[in-house]
Amino acid sequence: FKRSITCEKMASVEKVREEAVPDMTAISDLDEEKMLKNLEDRYLHSATTEPYTYVSTVLVAINPLKKIVGPTNENFFNTAFNPNIPHPNALAELAFQRLNSEHNQSIVVSGESGAGKTETSKMVVQYLSERSF
């Protein structure tokens, strides 16, 4: 992470929350320090590398700079949105379901150079292509 966080702020974050959460809307008084700490905990300190975290239906991703074995596209077909399983395919499925109910949808993939925008976009397009048949 590029930003530095003081030891005092980190100690206060640790007191508020003991473990990382998949959807940061569960964090009371969400601020930058708590968000960065949660992302770090999910990515570096979880049993499995967790590069994806939600803030409601916004997906925050950390580029792992390596191939991650994840669920297959079929695991998300016809599933309800689950805030405990953050993944690009979950958001693609949500958009697909809402599109079928005649609501226009968009998926915005944004980030810095090297953040993984192209790979994430390819995942979403592949998912929607498979889902359309």
Image (spheres, helix red, strand yellow):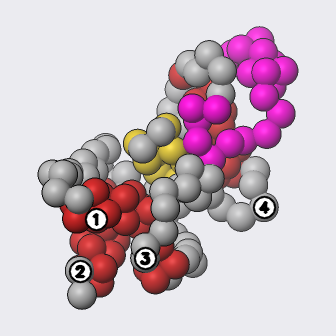
Residue 6 visible within the image: yes
Query: In this view of the protein, which residue sits in the foreground, 64 or 90?
Result: 90
Q: Quadrant of residue 48?
A: bottom right
Residue labelled with disc 4 = 47
Q: Compared with residue 97, is residue 110 higher up or lower down, i.e. above or below?
A: above
Q: Residue placed at 37% from the left, 52% from the top?
A: 115
Mark 4 vs mark 2, CA separation in Å: 34 Å
Residue 90 image position (x, y, % from top left): 44, 62
Q: Compared with residue 83, is residue 95 higher up or lower down, i.e. above or below?
A: below
Q: Tell me which amino acid carries mark 3.
A: Phe
Do the CB atoms of the residues marked 1 and 2 lie less than 8 Å apart? yes
N-terminal label among 1 and 4 = 4
N-terminal label among 3 and 2 = 3
Q: Quadrant of the C terminus?
A: bottom left
Mark 1 vs mark 4, CA separation in Å: 31 Å
Mark 2 element type: loop
N-terminal label among 4 and 2 = 4
Magenta segment, which residues? Answer: 5-26
Residue labelled with disc 3 = 77
Q: Compared with residue 44, is residue 118 higher up or lower down, i.e. above or below?
A: below
Mark 3 element type: loop
Mark 4 element type: loop
